[in-house]
Amino acid sequence: MDIIYAIKEIAEDFQNYYGGEHLLVIFVFCLLLAYLCFPELKRIVLYPTLMITFLLINPLLYQKIFHRIIFWRLLWMIPSTVIVAYVFCQLIRTGTTIQKKTAIVALMCLLTVFSGNYVYENVEFQKTQNLEKIDSGVKSVGKIIMKHCENPKCLLRSKYLSQIRQYSTDIELLYGRNVYNYITGASDEYKRIADEMEKKEPDYAYILEIFKANQCNVIAVRDEAPIPEGLLRQYDLYEISREDESIIYKSKQAP
């Protein structure tokens, strides 16, 4: 990754985060105004903000330390909303009459509204299909797991790794979505298991050996690739349900 490409990615992330360049301009303007006119903010807010911003927009650090997933979350550290709100409130206080204060509020509201974009025009955002923000398949699988197992430790398909613990934090996973290096690296053993779980003909002998060694008690596989009967008997498993194109098995030893 060269410097120019890193700068381009940083600029795209800033624009996506702020919903457009206009809101970013408002934040930068408020940051400068606060620095010049409100010295009480310098030590507790502005200096830390400037330091964080400098570190984030530094293309060398971006190349060596950050990648897009981590960088996106670091943008949350910039207190842009707090600074904009504080500056707006201070400007309102400068109004000497109720008419002037009202005019400043109206101007700022219009400036904020017309500087934004319709959020769903951005490919980064989509309307949720359910208020719980959990896929219906995840909910059905999670419900079955919690119904049949008191302390589930699960080996699940990749489609459930991101959301299953949103359904219930009582569901423990052998590995989570980070097995695909979402944020940090995962062990080669877990990566192999995750890959095997998605194959047309998984190596269940290997998968179940790791499953047993890690004291897991629930496994969900593709319904097109059921675990052979011989391995079910060998590892003392039985089918408890078929949900969301998956077969869910449980250890007979698990409560």
Image (spheres, rainbow, N blue to C red):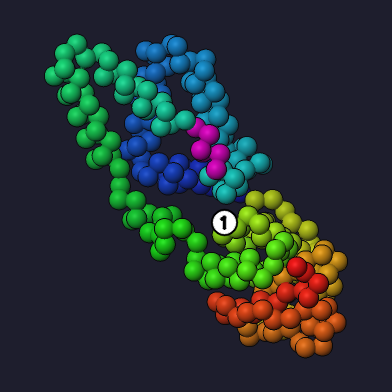
Q: Residue at x 28, y 18 (%)?
A: 91
Residue at x 79%, y 62% (from the top left corner): 188
Residue 199 location (% of width, % of height): 68, 78
Query: At label 1, which amino acid type do we have?
Result: Gln
**Residue found at x 56% / y 48%:** 68
Q: Nearer the viewer, residue 127 or 233?
A: 233
Query: Looking at this rendering, what residue extends furthest in the left direction?
Result: 99
Which stretch did the figure color magenta?
Answer: 73-78
Quadrant of the rendered image containing residue 249: bottom right
Of helix, strand and loop, which mostly describes the magenta segment? Answer: helix
* Image location of residue 232, percent across then percent down: 79, 83
Q: Percent from the top left, x then y, of residue 17? A: 44, 44
The answer to which of 10 and 153 lies nearer the viewer is 153
Instruction: Answer left or right for 225 relative to 22.
Output: right
Disc 1 secondary structure class: helix
Q: Is residue 76 magenta?
A: yes
Q: Nearer the viewer, residue 49 or 214?
A: 214
Q: Does residue 154 appear anywhere in the picture?
A: yes
Residue picked out by circle 1: 166
Q: Is residue 178 magenta?
A: no
> Residue 136's spot in the image, x, y percent?
49, 69
Up the image or down, 229 lies above or below 2; here it is: below
